[in-house]
Amino acid sequence: MKTTTKNNSHTNMLEVNPDSGEIVLESDEKELSKLKQTKIKALKLLNKNDFFLINGNWEAKRDALIKILSSLPLSYAWEIKDKVLTKEYAQISGTLTIRNGSIMRIADSMGIFERSELKGNGGLHFMNARAETRALKRAIEVLFGSVINYFVVNYLQER
């Protein structure tokens, strides 16, 4: 499947893998090879303990996603765009930008943590931190979804 997207004033043809939904970027061979090697390294970082089963779905743990982000040969920037903090909830919206050579990917995400989720001690600082963690986790899941999905399908799901 192919789709056309416009990036600034450029028009690019994107190829989409129909099985995984992954977008195959149009780039020079060296950059695509570097991207593939980065994905292989990310896959090798993961193990079964990096996931938990919740409501019938496998979810990557926060530590697994941070491990991917911090252990790979890429650069990244996490920018908080909006923050709402009330007595009842904290909401964080942010943007994660990842660069691997000339390839750049960006994901916007939002995380919410409600006071009703608090167990024991905790306050506004904890609510704020948990909302930011959730937003960052979601952004990493978007940018590394193909690696995470591959691991789940091939190592966690029963065949």
Image (cartoon, rainbow, N blue to C red):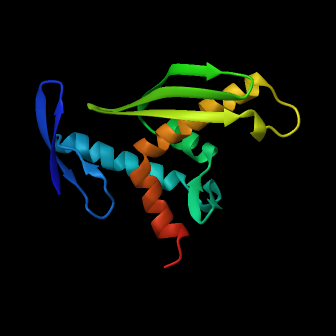
Task: Report which quarter residue 136 is drawn in.
Answer: top right
Rendered location of residue 102, percent (x, y)? 26, 31
User: Is 91 or 108 nearer to us in this picture?
Assistant: 91
Tell whether 105 sits left or right of 49: left
Rendered location of residue 69, percent (x, y)? 50, 38
Residue farthest toward the bottom in the current orientation of the protein? 159
Where, quadrant-wise, is the N terminus in this rendering? bottom left
Which residue appears at 15% of the width and 52% of the height? 2
Tell whether 18 sits left or right of 130: left
Rendered location of residue 134, percent (x, y)? 59, 37
Q: From what the image shows, is residue 69 above or below residue 2?
A: above
Which residue appears at 61% of the width and 62% of the height? 48
Tell whether 74 sits left or right of 112: left
Residue farthest toward the right in the current orientation of the protein? 120
User: Is 69 or 44 nearer to us in this picture?
Assistant: 69
Task: Report which quarter residue 25 is drawn in.
Answer: top left
Which residue appears at 25% of the width and 58% of the height? 17
Number of numbered callouts drawn: 0
Which residue appears at 41% of the width and 42% of the height? 143
User: Is 65 or 37 nearer to us in this picture?
Assistant: 65
Rendered location of residue 12, percent (x, y)? 13, 38
Q: From what the image shows, is residue 131 above or below residue 24?
A: above
Task: Report which quarter residue 38 is drawn in.
Answer: top left
